[in-house]
Amino acid sequence: MEKKMRGLFPILLTPFTASMDVDFDTLAKLVEYYRKEQVDGLTCLGEVSEVDLLSDGEKQKILRKVLNAVHGEMPVIAGAGRGSIEPTSAAVREAFDLGASAVLLPPPKNPGLTGEEIYNYYMEVDSSADGIIIILDNPSLGYPLIPVDIVSRLVTNSRHIRGIKVEEQPSFLKIAGLRQNIGADLPIYGASHGRNLFWEMERGIDGVITSAPIPSHMRMIWNLFTTGKREKAYEAFLASLPMAYFLQEKPVAVKKEILRHLGIFPNNLVRKHGDSLDPMTASDLDNLVDWTIRKFHDLE
């Protein structure tokens, strides 16, 4: 099995201009922000990137921009799910041709798919791929449940499936089941905006693939835990939870407002109608961000 990609791989949100075009200058600024925070890699075109509201042309331009901005100095994971085998296979090949280190791949958005149908889908895409595929396991977004035994078969029989991002809740129990049935070789990544991070780490995740507008906070938790400072890691984890749980129904708008408050984004615009934050809610979130930053500063 290939060397594991370990650590923090934040998902890049997609900034927009006032006319709702992709703001590529701000995207470059976001990449530089994460590079300075010394994350281990980046993920683009994930669910919180508003990927379903981007055109194929925008997706390609975003991936090119991110890959050019990192200068080959860190791995980039690219979301490549397109709903059915042919367009997904094409997106996977394109991502690797452009230079992505891995692709993040959900099953089709059909919760009624059987385990065997999920298995066949991944194996078909795998047959034409030329790089690492990471399974996205997130039934809360309309994807089907992916049973542990199906993951085990895919890892055993495929050429390129070498990881899974777990968002089936409670995620730490799914992670425990995967570790018990598949072992330590499978790279497993936590997610869920860091809401279960400490318990996911207890069960042996190799990294985190999620939105992380303040990556230094997640890094602190990660470093404290991996250096044996478990109690201190737990304190930091608890300090992160109010912000992680704030307005769960609108995670993209929340993360964008945090980035706006930090001066990374010029606005908090989202493409999905009705998902914007009202001024009072945005102000409440800004106050919570400031409180969280102070709490983490006190923990240093």
Image (cartoon, rainbow, N blue to C red):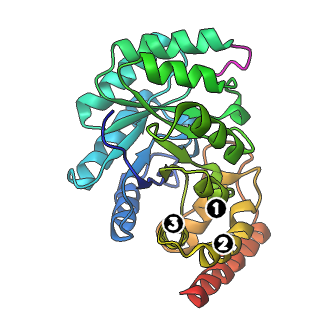
Residue position for label 1 = 198
Residue linked to disc 2? 234
Residue 53 in view: yes
Tell me where the magenta segment starts and ends, as one range. Answer: 109-113
Which quadrant of the figure contains the N terminus?
top left
Compared with residue 294, is residue 89 higher up or lower down, i.e. above or below?
above
* Secondary structure that dominates the magenta span: loop
Residue 167, image x, y percentages: 65, 41
Q: Contact, CB < 8 Å: mark 1 with mark 3?
A: no
Image vertical order of residue 288 relative to residue 10, above or below: below
Q: Position of residue 136 (x, y in %)?
A: 55, 33
The x and y percentages for residue 146 are 64, 25
Relative to residue 265, is residue 202 drawn left or right?
right
The residue at the point 37 percent across, 52 percent down is 24
In the depicted view, which residue is nearer to us: 221 or 279? Answer: 221
- How would you rate the neighbour count of disc 2 (Cα within 10 Å): few for under 14, some for 14-19, many for 20 or more? some
What residue lies at 75% left-to-right and 54% top-to-bottom? 248
Up-down: is 64 above or below 132?
Answer: below
Give the CA separation, mark 1 to mark 3.
8 Å
- Give the SS element for disc 1: helix
